Image (spheres, rainbow, N blue to C red):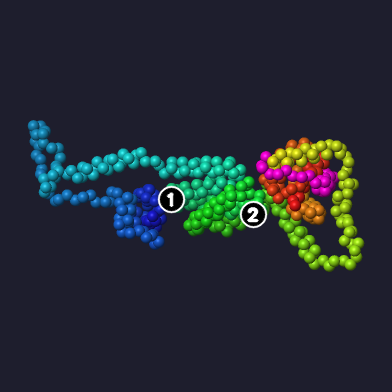
Amino acid sequence: MDIICAKCGKHFSDIEAAREHRGHCKETSKDEAIRWIPAQKSKISPEEWERLMRLINPQSVSAPQTPDVKPTPIESTSPKDSTEPDATIPVTNSGNSKSAPVKKEAVKNKRAKASNYKIQNWLIALILFFALCVIGLGISLFVGILIPFWLLFIFSLVYVVEKWFYYFTRKYRVIGKLYRLLLNLSLLSLLGIIIWTSAQLFSQQFVHNPLVGSVIFLAELAMLVWMWKVVSKNSWRWPSMKLTAFSLVGLCAIFAFAGVKPFTQYKDYSISTLNSWGKSLQDNLQQKESVPSDDPTSANEPNIITDKILNSQWWSGTDQESIISRSQTLFELTNEERMNSGLSPLQRNIQLDKLAQAKAESMYNTNVGMGISHSGFDERARIANNLGFSLVAENIAYGGFEASSFIEMWMNSPLHKANILNRGLTHVGIGIYGKYAIQFFGGR
């Protein structure tokens, strides 16, 4: 249903909103009846239109006409005539009293009583919203991720507004703008979730069961199509999708470079990942373009940088027993977290250990008390690639001393936790020095 007030031009999509508009139209006087017209794209038949008008304006429906018979006046001059009727009763041609209007009045009274027990729209909306949220929370607890909960949360919220409270978004401009902003942010977040899910799904790192992951991914696509239709329906509102997207990107960039967590962590991780990809691509191109040397000894020439980093001189030897003990504890706690999530344990690699330990000692000597930095990650990734690891990742923590404090910090960070629970990683090297701890992962 889509009808328009002929005076003020407002659209209404449900009967309750149209009834509330009576007496509130600024272009219509109190004594003047509201005139309705159908929308241009409406395909309502004349019979349906008449039925709709009766539902919106029940008082405007004319009552059945009784024959034009003059009432017989009753003259009452004394108390003795108390047996006479108190009012004039019209008499029809058939001699019957007005029994039909009495029956209709009784039916109206029954309907009025029944309407008193009708559940209000806001209560239905509240029950539906909480029911879908509880269902989404149950599914999320079952599969181990919060994506189903967020999907049903966004769906229930938008559906309730579209179904029962859309009139208020049109009536009040502020509510309408906030609603459009909510739609834009929901669509952008849903698009981001789909991109992340697809990357995790196709790399076989999304949930434990591929079938469950595929179903969640299809549900996200269906949700995206539905949300796109809702946003298109409200495209006339402000702010636009472009304005929201550019504003969001600008705010995230400002927060990232201002040092606000977790935006700074996302920025560092993104930059290090892009640099690693670029470096790997550049190395592959150089290897393809390189010409083999005629000198047979050049093939056996050791890599100078690799030999320098992997040489035992990078192990300081200072409090070596404590370093070995803490790194072994951190290695065991890391595998406990993986096994608790149903993943296979990592294998410890001595070459990756030396890379991680060298980075920890370097940060301690050059950056004491200044936080963490992933500088030199490209070089470490290149060395790991030469050692046969096609996939690498790195976690760095600062501020703790015990191994349990480091693993707790990493598991509370989504990006660091994702590295620990990455299915594609098979080996790990541990480096600990002072309050610095490093996990350098490799996958074959």
**Which residue is depicted at the point 76% across and 50% down?**
442
Element class at badge 2: helix
Q: Position of residue 259 (x, y in %)?
A: 71, 48
Q: Residues within 10 Å of mark 2 (few under 14, many from 20)?
A: few
Residue 355: within the magenta?
yes
Residue 440 as seen in the image, left or right of residue 107: right
Residue 361: within the magenta?
yes
Q: In the image, which residues are magenta? A: 340-367
Depth check: 53 or 47 in front?
A: 47
Element class at badge 1: helix
Q: Quadrant of residue 345?
A: top right
Q: Where does label 2 land, which residue?
A: 202
Amino acid on which disc 2 is placed: Phe
| Residue lying farthest to the top in this orientation | 80
Asked if residue 59 can be seen in this view, the reply is yes
Q: Where does label 1 land, which residue?
A: 167
Q: Position of residue 227 (x, y in %)?
A: 52, 54
**Which residue is depicted at the point 73% across and 58% down?**
277
